[in-house]
Amino acid sequence: MSLWCDKYRPRNFQELDYQFEQAKLLQTIVANGDFPHFLIFGPNGSGKKTRITCLLHALYGDGVQSLRLENHEYETPSRKKIEITTIGSNYHTQVNPSDVGIYDRVVIHELIKTIAQTKQINSIEQRSFKIIVIVEVDKLTRDAQHSLRRTMEKYVSSCRLILCCNSTSRVIPAIRSRCLGIRIAAPTTDE
């Protein structure tokens, strides 16, 4: 049995019922095949994660709906063990590295490195890259954001990032300049 909000959440662009121009933009990007890094931002409850789900569905089909939880353990330079839980499919991984506090830099670097070095399943039929969705990127430390910038440049051939946040003011300019920014506004009262 699933939650009501999950059962009726739109899974593709045709099921969205507001902000159609952004849905068309995302569909055009998927159709062109040149998929950049994204920075999706907007207020709470505006539909950022719903649009990310629709984008993933447009890229990979129904396979992104088969979700699983994974626990990852990383070791800091001071030998402290850090555990983080990710959710994902064979095509994407979603993580919130700000959950581990000041050790978010280690999680960012190691997780992206691990995912980027694994081969994509069915790469002949699908895209040749994996997607990493990083939520609350505006809550990452400066060190983690600089590490993210270096890592996203290094592994651009094997993975793409979709960064999700409420505001871009706390995201360093180097990351903002490397991503296509899409603002998701809150729905109006009529919508």
Image (cartoon, rainbow, N blue to C red):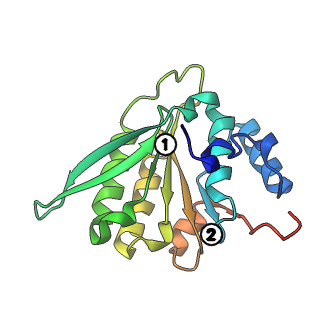
Q: Nearer the viewer, mark 1 or mark 2?
A: 2
Q: Residue tagged by mark 1?
A: 159
| Residue sitting at x 43%, y 46% | 155
56 versus 145 height, above or below: above
| Residue sitting at x 61%, y 31% | 60
Place of residue 44 in the rendered image (x, y in percent of width and height, measured from the top left): 62, 69
Q: Amino acid at mark 1?
A: Cys
Quarter of the figure with residue 167: bottom right
Q: Which mark is residue 5?
A: none
> Could you tell whether 100 is left or right of 8 in the image?
left
In the displayed orientation, state which residue is furthest to the bottom: 169
Place of residue 8 in the rendered image (x, y in percent of width and height, measured from the top left): 69, 44
Query: Considering depth in this image, is 27 or 53 the residue closer to the camera?
Result: 53
Label 1, secondary structure: give it.
strand
Decide: few, some or many residues near mark 2? Use Cα within 10 Å; few <14, some 14-19, many ≥20. few
Q: Residue tagged by mark 2?
A: 44
Place of residue 96 in the rendered image (x, y in percent of width and height, measured from the top left): 42, 59
